[in-house]
Amino acid sequence: MIKKVLITGATGLIGRELVKQCHGEGIVVNYLTTSKEKIENTENFKGFYWNPKKGEIDTKAFEDVTAIINLAGASISKRWTKKYKKVIIDSRVQPINLLYETLQKIDHNVVHFISASGINIYPNSKTKLYSEEEDGEGGTTFLAEVVVAWETAAAKFKNAGMEVSKVRTGIVLAKEDGAFPKLIEPIKLGVGAPLGSGQQWQSWIHIKDIARIYLFLLKNQLEGKYNAVAPNPVQNKKMVKMIASKMDSPLWLPNIPAFALKLLLGEMSVLVLEGQLVSSKKIEQLGYQFEFYNMENALQDLL
């Protein structure tokens, strides 16, 4: 029975929901934060300062902890300048390296390391369904490069005798933050439209399910790679139409052409123009049951 877990990125979108669910299961959460103002100290939620850039960390964060869930990483939705691309990679790799190096030096009880990852490791495809074992060919985008660096850093914990889990996350849908509010804003204003061809797959997951998957891996001490996507991906065109009809908002515009999105977003346009069709079979076969398994019931909850 897991009694105490250490979470990095606990104040982010997924982290907040995960902390709530851990507390619901009676699991005490220690968390690391780069902001001293965000340090709280209650009976079941204790904050500790760290600065991965400078290699600083409060080792008291590891006391009585048996598992670490790593969600640290800078947003990918800011413009990808050369400088910011380095921030995206460093913000994922440096925290993992610091955790690993620290555990080498101290006495600890950590047996399980669970790290966030992304489905962008798979190439863009309209027809191929990707399972966890099919990443050999790999994507060629900057995001694929990010995921490879991220997962390579996480794999080191295996050498230290720990179980390692990598959670390849799809598009996380949440009411208050992340991709979903940005997605519905133009539709709400009556200027929604499919993006590019509209045929690109959106392998999505509801915020509650992504947090529950972390909890499921934690409680069952499952190692390996897991796709964290709902069982029913949808194409962009269908997603936009479903949201518009739920919101009673007309879609007047034709598709927004790919070239316009490339001009507007530059290299970042892959976020909206490309997609992967990703399978959730592996986690389901291990007994995980999705609460939000199709777009219909997810939208019911989110709108």
Image (cartoon, rainbow, N blue to C red):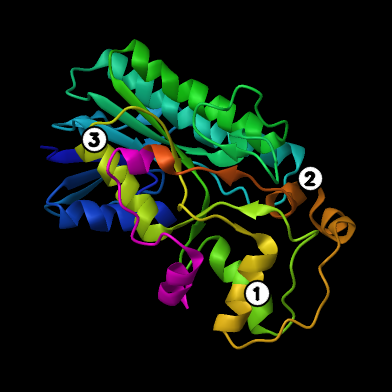
Q: Are marks 1 and 3 in contact (CB under 8 Å)?
A: no
| Image-quadrant location for residue 280 | top left
Q: CA distance from mark 1 to mark 3?
A: 46 Å
Q: Position of residue 115 (x, y in %)?
A: 40, 34
* Between discs 1 and 2, the one toward the N terminus: 1
**Residues shaded magenta:** 283-303
Q: Secondary structure at mark 3?
A: helix
Instruction: Report the residue marked by disc 2.
Output: 267
| Image-quadrant location for residue 16 | bottom left
Of circles 1 and 2, which is in front? 1
**Residue 175 in sight from this viewpoint:** no
Taking 4 as reference, is 84 left or right?
right
From the viewer's side, name the closer residue of 190 and 39. Answer: 190
Circle number at residue 61: 3
Taking 257 as reference, is 234 left or right?
left
Q: Position of residue 107 (x, y in %)?
A: 18, 17
